Image (tube, coloured by chain):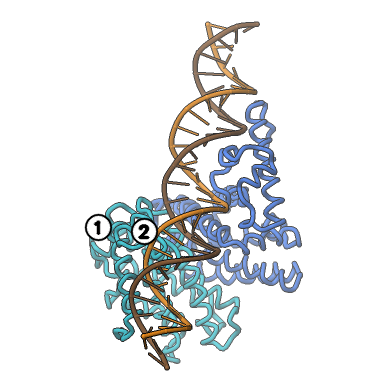
Chain colours: A cyan, B blue, C orange, D brown
Amino acid sequence: MPMPTDRRTRKRLATRRTISFAADRLFRERGFDNVTVDEIAAAADVGRMTVFNHFARKEDMFFDRDEEGRDILRNALRQRDPAVSPVETLRRLAHRLVAERVPFLRFTDASQDFIQTAEDSETLKARARAIRDELAAVVTAALAEDAGREADDPDARLAAGLLLATWTVAFLEAHRIFRQARDGEKAKAALLALVDKGSHGVAAAMAGTPYA
Amino acid sequence: MPMPTDRRTRKRLATRRTISFAADRLFRERGFDNVTVDEIAAAADVGRMTVFNHFARKEDMFFDRDEEGRDILRNALRQRDPAVSPVETLRRLAHRLVAERVPFLRFTDASQDFIQTAEDSETLKARARAIRDELAAVVTAALAEDAGREADDPDARLAAGLLLATWTVAFLEAHRIFRQARDGEKAKAALLALVDKGSHGVAAAMAGTPYA
DNA sequence: ACGATTTCTATACCGGGTACACATTTTGCG
DNA sequence: CGCAAAATGTGTACCCGGTATAGAAATCGT
């Protein structure tokens, strides 16, 4: 991430970070729904409109790096080994990401606090669902492109929907286990077991298509 | 649905219907997001607070009969033929519902207007996602109960998640086809083809569990 | 150094939703 | 019947997220 030479964008990024930090601190302290945008603005020492200038929705201050997920999935499919099917590529990606202890899959107390904060807010759960829908659209497009089919190919939609459902269930189950047992390895094992089960099912559903 | 003898509840249901009708008409005329609760109250000739007394959320005036879906799924699993697996039971349920031209699966211009209104509103799409989550929870619980496992059995969660994803993709794809081709039979065929594909995948994923 | 562009900010507003208080209606019961 | 209790309808006032707009201040290119 290169430091921009521009003073303007440098300052802009600075205030954005200030707002983001203030918001994160308040969210963790008191829960997402018990923090108002005015309080965040005050804590960051900026005007209320400045907050909305940087973040269209209040939830965007919480889910900040949601574009990374899109890029990871897209790139994994773009750069896949032609000998490995798309579904299998994504299954292996999940294993790799868990091994690399990527954010969200770290299973430490700190990262789980973050997830717990999200689970405790109806607003954030709604936003998480919307983000998953966007991810499904990305996967659909990437799969269709990979197979040289139309962007809205029904099979691609089904595969993407099944995969997202698998990852969601696996992720939440792993979180549940970690919260209860405080055992990161156990959580990861459960996550990967569910991903493998789901991937196997998706492959079966996609038999006869280019996606399996 | 027996007519309640109670005058109180009879009146209550009457005003509820009045509100619901007024809301539906306005939603169809101008789209969900272009109708305010005040306008609905005025159209139904009741106070604003009365509206919120009957419908906790504005979206609830649109998605009214969402409890029926829950009951249908629960009952289908409770009364299933022991010789037919849960997943196969639900696959056959889908076929039966389509054949019975149940609401939502009628594929007539009128019912598709309803769906289109929902598709055109970000608010309603969000609510639809939430309802699907609740349905997944119901299916999870019903599957687990059927198998005599704990209510939060991870396999049941995965099966429910995969099934809901399948139905959602199939439903939306059928809607898309109907909107484009105005051919109800073609839409139904596409829906059932995707349900069959998805169900086959779920069965594969659930191999070795009581759900397949 | 100056005009154009961008960022920040205040003010005013909209709309969904809640809290609360109060009137009215209905019901159950002595 | 008559009356207390419970439930329903409704007005008022408020909170909060989000938008529109217009102006002030900082930054940039030349």
Callout 1: few (<14), some (14-19), or many (20+) C-alpha neighbours within 10 Å?
Answer: few
Q: Which chain is indicated by disc 2?
A: A
Label of residue B209 in the image = none
Callout 2 environment at 10 Å: few (<14), some (14 to 19), or many (20+)? many
Residue A28, located in which quarter of the rendered image? bottom left
Residue at 50% of width from left, 74% of height from top?
A160
Labels 2 and 1 positioned on one and the same chain = yes
The three-letter amino acid code for the residue at tag 2 is Ala
Q: Quadrant of the N terminus of chain B?
A: top right
Identify residue type, mark 1.
Ala
> Which image quarter: residue A151?
bottom right
Q: SS class of the residue under badge 2?
A: helix
Return the disc, 2 or 1, that comes first in the chain's sequence.
2
* Residue designated by label 1: A181
Q: Which residue is drawn at 51% across and 82% down?
A: A143
**Position of B18 compared to B166: left or right?**
right
Q: Where is residue C8 in the image (x, y as percent from the top left)?
A: 37, 67
Q: Name which quarter of the figure residue D28 lies in.
A: bottom left
Cα separation between marks 2 and 1 = 20 Å
Q: SS for tag 1?
A: helix
Residue B86 shows in the view: no
Q: Can residue A176 be seen in this view?
A: yes
- Residue nearest the observer in this picture, A26 or D28: D28
- Residue found at x 59% / y 37%: B50
**Chain letter behind tag 1:** A
x and y, in percent, of residue A38 in the image: 37, 55
Percent of width and height locating residue B97: 67, 57
Q: Which mark is residue A118?
A: 2
